Image: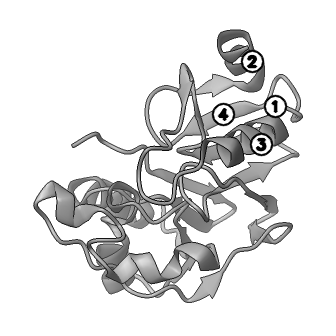
Amino acid sequence: MNSVNGYLIWDLNEAIVIDPGSKKEVFEIKNKIEEFDLNLKYIINTHSHFDHIGGNEFLKNNFNVKLGIRSKEAENLSDPEKNLSKYMGIEIISPSADFFLESKDNLIIGDSKFDIIYCPGHSPGSISLYNEDDGLLFSGDTIFKHGVGRTDLPGGNKDKLNSSINNLIELSDDTKVYPGHGPETTIKEFKEYYF
């Protein structure tokens, strides 16, 4: 099973966790939240595949936190067949979403704003989170340093993924990209590799 990049981001003392992967990884996240005395406001899933939602239950059980995902992905959270965990020989059942993230929504963490960018293709309801002020993009499984999200899983669509990629490459070249798997990159590096 490939490890997912889960992210703990904070500004002032407010925090967000993007794609909490396995239970092992969320123990580390929990320790950091407690070490820095952070107020965890949100868990955000960029999509509902098992490797991105595996830590939802642990964090929900340990913090008074709201879980958000795009509405098109919400029903998959509690369905091991739809979140694909069943095919890995495990059954991940996540708590239900507390709210839905749609295009042009944003989240405020401290003084930082994260815009929601709808990025279908890898899955029907994939999203990315973009912080324009700091030039940060959390791309989920849409783009990686040396590749793009696969489209051969249920709900994948190559044409929609290509359209999502074309939207993301319109961001500033120096935007730092933090993908769901693998090392970070920039929009410029991604374009040089991909095109």
Q: Nearer the viewer, mark 4 or mark 3?
A: 3
Q: Element at badge 1?
A: loop
In space, the residues marked 4 and 3 are separated at their CA atoms by 18 Å
Task: Please tell me how crowded label 2 is: few (under 14), some (14-19), or many (20+) other residues with Cα within 10 Å.
Answer: some
Q: Which residue is mark 4?
A: 177
In space, the residues marked 3 and 2 are separated at their CA atoms by 14 Å
Relative to 159, does residue 115 appear above or below in the rendering? below
Residue 169: image tag:
1
Q: Nearer the viewer, residue 96 or 167?
A: 167
Q: Whole-percent x and y of residue 79?
A: 32, 79
Q: Earlier in the sequence, mark 2 or mark 1?
A: 1
**Is the C-beta separation of discs 2 and 1 under 8 Å?**
yes
Q: Which residue is mark 2?
A: 191
Q: Quadrant of residue 39?
A: bottom right
The type of residue carrying mark 1 is: Ile
Q: Residue at x 62, y 79 (%)?
A: 71
